[in-house]
Amino acid sequence: MTKSGTLVVNQAAADADPRFVAPDLVALDSKGAPRLIGGHCRKCGAASFPRAAVCTNCMSEDIETVELAHEGTLYSYSIVHQAPKGWAVPYALGYVDLPSNIRVLAHLDAAADRIVINMPMRLAIGVVGADPSGKPLLSYTFTPV
Amino acid sequence: MREVCVIGTGLVAFGKYPNKTLAEIGWPAVKEAIVESGVPPKSIDAVYCGSALGGMLSGQRVMKSLGLTGMSIINIENACSSSSSALAEAWTAVSSGRHDIVVVVGVEKLTKFGGGTLPLENEDWEVNQGMVMPALYAMRAQRYMHEYGLTARQLGEVSVKAHEHGALNPNAQIRKRVSIEEVMASRPVADPFTLWHCCPTGDGAAALVIASADVARQHKANPVRVTASEVTSGLYTNGYRDMTWAELTARGAKEAYEMAGVGPDDIDVAEIHDAFTIAELMYYEAFGFCERGHAYELLSSGATSLGGDICVNPSGGLLSRGHPVGATGAAQAVEIVRQLEGRSGAHQVEGARVGLAHATGGGISGLDHGACSIHIFAR
C-alpha cells in the first residue's frame, strides 16, 4: 500500500459520468492508472477497504485516505449466470487478496477458462453492465497479470 | 434458568402462494400449533415473529387474523435466522421466568419479488459490485474444491440426497427425486452450481408453542425439551478469511454443544442450513460430524442419509423442503420436534432422541454470515 500524496479523486469524472458504479472506491493516479481508495488508521495502522469512517480495529476516526496496491492474488471466483437486472450475465466475480490484509470483491475481466485460483491479478476499469437506459456501467475490475 | 419445552407445532407446506397475503400464509401455522398444544389461546403471554422481508408488524398481521392480540408481540428480522432468532428470544423469555407460554412464528412471502436471487441490501458495497448469494457460496465451493479436490459432480450428490429425502416429505416444496445427471445438466446459476445446487425461493410459515417445563407437563406427557438455544453473529473483517471453514457456525456449534451437554456423536438428526450444496458439506465439518476436508466421505458413506447414524435434513432441507427465508428456522425446529416425537412418517429417523436445528445466513460484506442460530432438542 502506498500513502497517497498525489491522489486525484475521480469525483469530477464521476459527476460527469453517473454510469460509474461506486466512484468513491476508485481514483486515477497522476498517470491515469486506476487505484482503489482505502483507509489507513493513523492510530493503529489497520487498513480498510472501502475506506472506513471509523477504524474497525480501534474505533479511531483518524483515518488517512490512501491508494491500495493495484496487484493481488485471486482467492476464489465464480462465473455468475443469474443476477439482478443490469448486470451483464454471465460475469466473472472474484475475491482478490491485496497486500496489507485487504480482500476486494471485483468483476474479473478475463475469459472464464483462463481464470484459476491463486493467479496474480491487476486492477483495471471495465464495463460490468448497463443502467436502466442501456448506458454501459463501469467499475473497477481485475484482469490477469 | 427454567427448562423450556415445545408443546405445539404448526407448519404450512412451503411453496408459492402469490395470491395470499403474508397473514394468510402465517395464521394456519399458528392455529395448528396452538390447537396441538392444548393451551387456552388467552393464556399466551407473548408472540415472537421472525420474518426477513415481510415488512412492518408481520406478527401483528398474523395474530390479528386469529383474533389473538393484546399480548406482547415482537417482530424479529435476522435474515435466514429470523425465526430461529425469534425462537431463541422466546426461549430466553420463558427460561428467565418472564413468560410461561409463548408462540414463535416464522413467516415469509418471497413470491412478491417475482423470482430470481434474493434481494440484498443495496447499501452494501459488495452487492453494488455484483454480489449475489449464489456467487458467495459458489466462491466457497470453488476454494473448497481447489483445496480438497472435491469435484462438482461429488458436490451435486448433496442435492441428490436432499431430494431423496424431500420426496418422502409431504410438506416439501420440491417432492421430486433428481439424478446426478439431472443435477449436472440443469442450467448454470453460479459455477460450480447449477439450478439443482440451489434452494428454491418461495412462501411459507411455521410455528411453535413453547412453555416452561412445569406448564408444559400439564398439557403434554414427555414433551420435547429445548436443551440449547443460541444466536451468534459473524466476525467482521475486511481482510483475508478462510472461506472453506464455516467459522460462525463452528463457534455457534461449540456454544450449543456446551449448553446442551452433548457432542456431535450424540446427535441423531439434524436440520442444517443447506441453502446451497457446499453449505451442507461445510457444516458437517463445522458441527464436528467429520474432520475438515472429509465431508464428502461422510456424505457418500450414507451416514447422513435416512437410515444413517447422523441423518442430516430428513425433511429435504432448504434444497428440497424450500427456503422462505424468515420461516426456515421455525420450520427446522418443527421438523426436529416432530422427529423426536416419532411423527414424521415416511421420512422418520427411527429412534431419534437428540436433534439439532441450524439456521444461518444473511449476505453482508465483511462477515461470514450475518447471523447463526442453533437449537438442540431432546426427548
Image: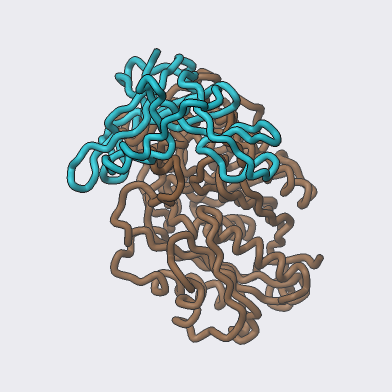
Chain colours: A cyan, B brown
Which residue is depicted at the point 38% across and 16% down? A144
Front-most of residues B366 and B212: B366
Camera sees residue B160: no
The answer to whether B292 is drawn above or below residue B272 in the figure is: above
Question: x%, y% of residue A83?
Answer: 32, 41
Which residue is depicted at the point 37% across and 22% down? A33
The answer to whether B210 is drawn above or below residue A134 in the figure is: below
The answer to whether B43 is drawn above or below residue A119 in the figure is: below
Question: x%, y% of residue B54?
Answer: 43, 65
Front-most of residues B62 and B369: B369
Which residue is depicted at the point 61% across and 86% down? B42
Instruction: Name the residue at the top extreme.
Output: A145
Question: x%, y% of residue B25?
Answer: 40, 69
Instruction: Name the residue at the left extreme.
Output: A134
Count of numbered tags: 0
Which residue is depicted at the point 31% across and 48% down? B116
The answer to whether B64 is drawn above or below residue B210 in the figure is: below
Location of the C terminus of chain B by quadrant is bottom right
Camera sees residue A118: yes
Asked whether, in this view, residue A145 is left or right of residue B68, the answer is: left
Asked whether, in this view, residue B262 is left or right of residue B50, the answer is: right
Location of the N terminus of chain B by quadrant is bottom right
Instruction: Name the residue at the front extreme.
Output: A6
The quarter of the picture where residue B78 lies is bottom right
Question: x%, y% of residue A61?
Answer: 63, 45
The quarter of the picture where residue B210 lies is bottom right
